[in-house]
Amino acid sequence: MLYLIGLGLGDTKDITVKGLEIVKQCSRVYLEAYTSILTVGKEALEEFYGRELILADRDMVEQEADEILKGADTSDIAFLVVGDPFGATTHSDLVLRAVNAGIQYKVIHNASILNAVGCCGLQLYNFGETVSIVFWTDTWKPESFYDKIQRNRENGMHTLCLLDIKVKEQSMENLLRGRKIYEPPRYMTVSQAAEQLLEIVQNRRQRGEALAYTEDTVCVGLARVGAEDQAIRAGTLRQLAACDLGGPLHSLIVTGHLHPLELDMLRLFTVQPGALDNLKTLDSSTYTS
Amino acid sequence: MLYLIGLGLGDTKDITVKGLEIVKQCSRVYLEAYTSILTVGKEALEEFYGRELILADRDMVEQEADEILKGADTSDIAFLVVGDPFGATTHSDLVLRAVNAGIQYKVIHNASILNAVGCCGLQLYNFGETVSIVFWTDTWKPESFYDKIQRNRENGMHTLCLLDIKVKEQSMENLLRGRKIYEPPRYMTVSQAAEQLLEIVQNRRQRGEALAYTEDTVCVGLARVGAEDQAIRAGTLRQLAACDLGGPLHSLIVTGHLHPLELDMLRLFTVQPGALDNLKTLDSSTYTS
């Protein structure tokens, strides 16, 4: 049996009781290590489980999936994923490989950022499509998420922006020379994401285009959701660009229409007192206080 | 401290290790009992936790919140919610009351249907707005979710339909007479939801309107997600209307644009072999195989 087990978002103890029982009994346990991270590392998990973990990076999951599945027809193999196992596409691929090889699988669910963001008080069923914001470079500044945020806001929906993670990336030089030397991991911050969103708006304003959001649109920054030191800040996009939420992982929400109860919850997390007291009506989807 | 603890979706052991530790140490533990259910009852939870639970129905949470929060400034109170604590609006209300009373709170997240539906292989970031489908009566047949499904499908997005739960409902007679006699709980099935969706389409077709979906649109029915006996069936809306997925809780997904990998996953769950082999192109958002 292949078990795909979600670890939740915070630390070692966010695994479920069922998940922990299975981890202890499997013959091999892999830890997926590239779509998300916990606030604790592999060693802390190993100590808590009382057993060794095999780190599975993207190369391994995509190119050596057969190695991971080896023996899973007769013994139990666990594949641990931060959050819930079905947040990332690659794990569908692993499931399909297992099924094609006649291996049964079972999923042990857990919280993922996609539902845990509800902790800021925005209603989950008021979220539209989730978007990803990638690190810009000097020459590559994709804006594909902008249209999705626009569509969500036109419909009054909030947008959860998942922020880029660069793990095991090679520099262009090392890539070209085929050297497996990796850059230090990088995790996009709320401030960096907000800066990119502001730059898009400034450019579009100069071109005279209608704007999906502005510097004054209410946004929410979240860091280390589910961990002891989680941080949530609500404020305007401009305010969040100046906000330091500490270590990874960060997420950003661009709000749509705000229900009064949602606004009451956001006020628990304002960047500065009164930051949400004089909301302007920017368009049909922004709440007037 | 007020702890809001998610129980996940399946049975007793879907609580997190952290959640279980807190439950054992709190002075009072409430079990929220109206927005969702586990496949096991209060008694099984009490046995697993080794302690008594206080059932909190809607009346209690909405009208006696102060009772729930009593003493939480000096001792620890737990409020258990099936799924994740921030699936339903009422719990924001409880948090705000706590904060206003000077009581600290902490959230222990868990899987909810909103992220666990990923187990069918549809990508979570391809979902648009979530909708709720309520039980129709002879005289009340709301269709408000139809426009949302339409909007999602126009954008190629999947729609998660949460299906109605009627718990502690009074008959009109008992309500008028002020008798606190409650009807047996009712949980909408995938088949019932599909029937209602079909009826809407038939009516709109007769009126000559453009259709958001048809009898042949690919849908996914899910029952008891996360439980040992979970059931997932993929097929056309018409096929799902004839499908019996067993006991509650059920959810239905109306798909939008299907990525080939998503389709490969859905084929693991087809109502009948080959059910997804000859997909017609119904509109821009439906996949052509």
Image: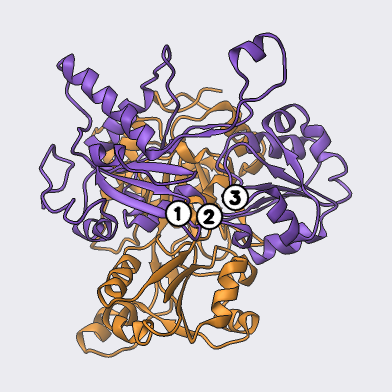
Chain colours: A orange, B purple
Discs 1 and 2 share one subunit: yes
Q: Residues within 10 Å of mark 1 (few under 14, many from 20)?
A: many
The residue labelled by disc 1 is B116
Q: Amino acid at mark 1?
A: Ala
The residue labelled by disc 3 is A232
Asked whether, in this view, residue A267 is left or right of residue A253, the answer is right
In which image quadrant can residue A74 be found? bottom left
Q: Amino acid at mark 2?
A: Ala
* Chain under numbered label 3: A
Dot 3 and dot 2 residues touching (CB under 8 Å): no
Q: Position of residue A227 (x, y in %)?
A: 63, 62
Observer-nearest of A278 and A125: A125
The disc at residue B111 is 2
Which residue is at 38% across, 32% downward? Answer: B192
In which image quadrant can residue B14 be found? bottom right
Dot 1 and dot 2 residues touching (CB under 8 Å): yes
Q: Estimate the spatial distance between the alpha carbons at disc 1 and disc 2, rounded to whole Å.
A: 6 Å
Observer-nearest of A208 and A89: A89
Q: Position of residue B237 (x, y in %)?
A: 25, 38
Which residue is at 25% across, 41% downward? Answer: B239
Q: Position of residue A257 (x, y in %)?
A: 45, 29
Q: Residues within 10 Å of mark 2 (few under 14, many from 20)?
A: many
Query: Taking A174 as reference, is B283 above or below it?
Result: above
